[in-house]
Image (cartoon, helix red, strand yellow):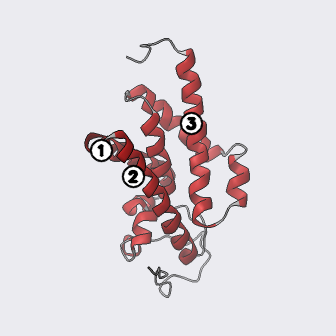
Amino acid sequence: MTTSMPETNNLPSTPTTLFRPTLALVYSHPAYLIAFSGGVGLIAIAPGTMGTLVALPLFWLLDQYLDPIPLLLLIDVMFIAGIWACGLSGKALGSPDHGSMVWDETVAFLLVLYFTPAHWAWQLAAFLLFRFFDIAKPQPIRYYDSRLRGGFGVMFDDMLAAFFTLLCLAGWKAWVPAGFFE
């Protein structure tokens, strides 16, 4: 199987911080479609937060139709697809972790939701914690965010944010009396 680069001839030659991808660009190649979470990353205000929010209805839908192990395997496949899609898209856009590429947030938060109790208060806490860790990037998230490049680097720092989110939720669950959120 060969993987070709998306067409880059039509991309502007201006710095990537000024470049705003369009919906037409998102639908021009499967890697863009994945990396931009179907176009959600194009939302101008807080694209990372929007990419995280996409995971909620997606998880609720997938959780209805898939048993736990197939769902976890699907999240794994989505992670691997994200390495490919974000790597290819970042290279084509000239920015390894373009702000509009939000698949990393979507997949990482799907993993968080997989391990989070199915109660709105737990899921809200998970969302807030995940966004905090993804935005603030405390160590070692910041270290790996600055060191790892390509699609794996884009996806990995969000997995670390997911890990810290789950660690906080597990600590909270250990200290909160049973039935607190019910």
- Answer yes or no: is residue 166 visible: yes
Position of residue 65 relative to residue 89, above or below, is above
Drawn side of residue 85 relative to residue 118, left or right: right
Depth check: give the residue in front, 22 or 125. Answer: 125
List x then y, in percent, for residue 52.
Answer: 46, 47
Q: Which quadrant holds the C terminus?
A: top left
Whether the residues at callouts 1 and 3 have beta carbons within 8 Å, the answer is no
Residue under circle 2?
74
Disc 2 packing (10 Å; few <14; some 14–19; many ≥20): some
Residue under circle 3?
165
Residue shown at 65%/44% (left/top)?
A: 136
| Label 1 vs 3, first from the N-terminus | 1
List x then y, in percent, for residue 7.
Answer: 46, 84
Distance in Å between CA atoms under marks 1 and 2:
9 Å
Type of the residue with mark 3: Thr
Outermost residue, left side: 65
Residue shown at 37%/46% (left/top)?
A: 71
Residue shown at 41%/59% (left/top)?
A: 37
Depth check: give the residue in front, 156 or 136. Answer: 156
| Label 1 vs 2, first from the N-terminus | 1
Q: Which quadrant holds the N terminus?
A: bottom left
Type of the residue with mark 1: Leu
Position of residue 21 relative to residue 132, above or below, is below
In front: label 1 or label 3: 1
Whether the residues at callouts 1 and 2 have beta carbons within 8 Å, the answer is yes
Residue under circle 1?
66
Disc 3 packing (10 Å; few <14; some 14–19; many ≥20): many
Disc 1 packing (10 Å; few <14; some 14–19; many ≥20): few
List x then y, in percent, for residue 19.
Answer: 54, 72
Distance in Å between CA atoms under marks 2 and 3:
21 Å
Residue shown at 70%/54% (left/top)?
A: 144
